[in-house]
Structure formats: C-alpha cells, structure tokens
Amino acid sequence: MKIRKNFALSLACGLFMAAAPTQSFAALPQGAKAPDFTLNAALGGKSFNLSLAKALKKGPVVLYFFPAAFTSGCTVEAHMFAEATGNFNKLGASVIGVTAGNVERVAEFSKSECRNKFAVAADPGAKVAAKFDTTMQGAKQTISNRTSFVIAPNGTILLSYTDMNPQAHIEKTMAAVRAWKAKHG
C-alpha cells in the first residue's frame, strides 16, 4: 500500500510539473539586493508573521522557494533542509521555506515535513516569488519554482540557485553560508 501511495505521489508531482509549460528561471542574481517581505508563516505548526528584514538582523538567511507543500520533491527538500538546519544554525544562518502552492497547509507542513526545524511561509498568488523572479505557471495558478537563495545580513544575495531537482540545494546553500562565515567570522 505504501509503495502505491509513494508512486501516486511521485506521479502526481510529475504531472503537476509537466502541467507547468511556461517557466521563468531567471531568479534574482548573486549581488542583487533581496526584496524585503512579510508573510504569514508557521514553525512547528504555530503561525506567526515572518519578516525577512527581522530574520536578517540575526544573521544570513537561507531562503528557499518550492512549488507546493506535500508534493514528493518538495517533501524530500523539506526533509533535507530539516536535517541540515542545525548545521546552518551553528554557522549563524536561519532557514526559511516559501511556497505559493498549498498555502493553506503550511502549518501542517512545517510540523510534519519541516520537522519543527525551520519556518515555512505561505505566498498566496506567488507575489513574493515574483519579486525574487522565481515563478512558474502551474496547472491552475502561478507558483514558485525550486530556487534557493543565501542572503547576507545586509540584504545582498550571496547565492541564487535554481534546479527542480532538490538534491543539490542543501550542498550549494551550505557552501555559500560557510564562505560568508569564513569572511565575516
């Protein structure tokens, strides 16, 4: 039964992505200034207002956009970021996930898939994703594509990485945070 469920999820995610014929992968580049935003978010299932400017006061931010909560690739990516969050925190960085898909389920996703390790924010209509130039057209709505940013405390983008495969996002963001930490102690 579990194999059937996993197959169905993978198939649904594949169909979801195949239904996205127009994609924009021209995310804000390294060196650009990250636009500030405030979104409704959840951490461990508890809702709060998340402000990028406030998060940056604590150190660099790993900001990753993903298409939709509870799809197979997004779940894998959330698990990977959850496992790496402690290492990011040791380097002074925080992790924030943002999605325009399944926005009504971010509290549940933050608890189960993000494992209470980092905040996940709802971006209805992909308005914040649009500011970061990281959107694509889904079957029924504009959503965020899979793009990770590392943002310095001054708001400068240190890394901009887009790839629909979630595997390299943790490695690349961790390398960028380590490089920042080496320069700034």
Image: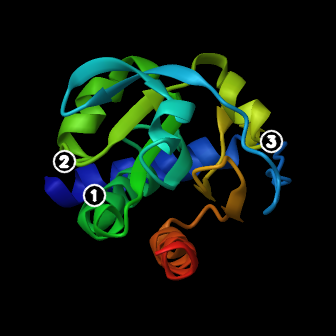
Q: Which mark sits nearer the N-terminus, 3 or 2?
A: 2
Q: Cα distance, mark 1 to mark 2? A: 6 Å
Tag of residue 125: none
Q: Determine whether, in the image, residue 152 is placed left or right of residue 107.
A: right
Q: Where is residue 17 in the image (x, y as percent from the top left)?
A: 63, 48
Foreground residue among 180 and 112: 180
Measure the alpha-carbon separation of dots 3 and 2: 28 Å
Helix, strand or loop status at disc 2: loop
Q: Do the residues labelled 1 and 2 touch (CB within 8 Å)?
A: yes
Residue type at mark 3: give it. Answer: Asp
**Disc 3 crowd, CA 10 A, few/some/many (<14, 14-19, 20+):** some
Q: Is residue 80 left or right of residue 24?
A: left
- Residue 178, position in %: x, y? 48, 78
Q: Callout 2 environment at 10 Å: few (<14), some (14 to 19), or many (20+)?
A: some
Residue holding disc 1? 82
* 99 shown above or below 183: above
Residue at left offset 73%, top offset 35%:
35
Residue 99: x percent and y percent? 52, 34
For marks 1 and 3, give the CA distance: 25 Å
Q: In this view, does 168 lie above or below 164?
A: below
Badge 1 marks a residue whose secondary structure is helix
Please state if 39 lies on the left or on the right of 23 as rendered: left
Is 11 or 148 nearer to us in this picture?
148
User: In the drawing, does residue 17 fall left or right of residue 112?
Assistant: right
Task: Report the amino acid beneath label 2.
Answer: Arg
**Does dot 3 land on a helix, a strand or a loop?**
loop
Q: Mark 3 points at which residue?
A: 133
Asked whether disc 1 touches disc 3, contact meaning CB atoms under 8 Å apart, the reply is no
Question: In the image, what residue type sits under mark 1?
Answer: Ala
Numbered label attached to residue 115: 2
